Each structure stands twice: as C-alpha cells, then as structure tokens.
Image (tube, helix red, strand yellow):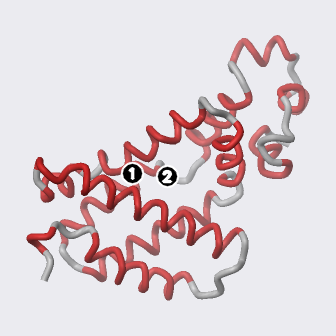
C-alpha cells in the first residue's frame, strides 16, 4: 500500500506518520529527511498523481471561452467532471486536511487563486476595473463544480448523468462567465 492508498482508504486524520513510514519501509527519522509532515506528503501526492493539474484545466477553459460557443463550454464542463472522477478517491483526504490543518488553508487558497490566473484572456476581456469580479466568478464556478461533484459522484445524492449535468451547468455558467458587454 502506498501513502496515497493510506489516505484514500483511511482518510487524512486517521493516517499517522508512523503508518506512512511503515508502509514505505522506512523509519520515522528517514521520513523526516524527506517530508516535514503528513500534510507535506498529501501535497506531494496531489502534485504527482492527479491526472491533470487544475491550472491546466482552467487554461483550457480560457481557450474554450475564446471560441464563444456554449457547446464548447459544455464540453469543457464534461471534461472537468471527468477530471473530478479520475481524482475522486484522493479529494476527500484533501478536504479533510483543509479542515484539520490551519496551514493547509493557505495552500488551498493559493490553489483557488491560481485558477483564474491561468485564464489571462478571460481576465483581459473583463477589463482592469472588473478583475476582482471576474476572478470571483471563476471561484464560484469552481465551488459549484466541486459541490455538485461531491453530491453526485462521492455521496450519490444527485442521480443525473454527467452529460445532463454538464448541459445544465453549461447553461448556467457560460453566460455567467461572459463580461457584461459581451452578454446578449
């Protein structure tokens, strides 16, 4: 079992540094030569094992929005849901660490901030005076996608197909991400 599998099967809180060291066959002292904490291990797992970096997905969104086609945006939503699906086993441990580790909040906050920053064309279309609003819209999109995914694929409390969800989310968010001057 790897440390990723430990976090997936037991959750973040239940896994100890001794558990991780034991699984990889090293001592606690050797662990600390490579990592400062189990939070550091989780961060490295996220950086190395996620299918695609979230900033890459939002750079794709930037290109998608340039097309001006809602169908392209809906396809992007579907791809985002596929990313969540590919990474869903480790995401609960990430959320648990965010709740339990105060210093993890800064890491998560930076990760959210980086998403709209990966969208320079989108931000430019909003103009210098509306950058905060443009970033907030992306952050709200991220929040809704995460919450939807948790209820849909993790908890099983929403029972619609991914395609149906992508179509509805596309209807909601395509217009919301357009600068006011571009709306019809």
The spot of residue 101 in percent (x, y) is 67, 34
Label 2's element? loop
Write down the residue under mark 1.
56
* Number of dots carrying numbers: 2
The spot of residue 40 in percent (x, y) is 65, 28
Residue 34 placement, left or right of 129: right
Which of the pair 160/46 is nearer the observer? Answer: 160
| Quadrant housing the N terminus | top right
- How many residues crowd mark 1 within 10 Å: few (<14), some (14–19), many (20+)? few
From the viewer's perspective, is residue 21 above or below residue 89? above
Residue 117 placement, left or right of 108: left
Residue 52 placement, left or right of 40: left
From the viewer's perspective, is residue 2 above or below residue 171? above
The spot of residue 105 in percent (x, y) is 56, 37
Q: In which quarter of the image is residue 34?
A: top right
Residue at the image position 26 percent from the left and 59 percent from the top: 62
């Amino acid at each position: 079992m790897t440390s990723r599998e430990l976090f997936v099967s037991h959750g973040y809180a239940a896994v100890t540094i001794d558990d991780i060291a034991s699984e990889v066959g090293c001592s606690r002292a050797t662990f600390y030569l490579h990592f400062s904490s189990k939070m550091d291990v989780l961060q490295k797992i996220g950086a190395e094992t996620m299918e695609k970096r979230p900033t890459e997905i939002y750079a794709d969104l930037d290109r998608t929005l340039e097309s001006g086609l809602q169908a392209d945006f809906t396809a992007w939503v579907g791809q985002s849901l596929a990313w969540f699906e590919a990474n869903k086993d480790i995401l609960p441990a990430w959320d648990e660490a965010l709740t339990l580790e105060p210093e993890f909040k800064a890491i998560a906050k930076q990760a959210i901030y980086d998403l709209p920053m990966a969208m320079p064309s989108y931000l430019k279309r909003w103009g210098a005076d509306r950058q905060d609003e443009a970033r907030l819209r992306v952050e709200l999109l991220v929040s809704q996608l995460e919450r939807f995914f948790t209820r849909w694929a993790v908890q099983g409390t929403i029972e619609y197909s991914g395609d149906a969800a992508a179509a509805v989310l596309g209807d909601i968010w395509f217009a919301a991400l357009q600068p006011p001057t571009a709306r019809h």
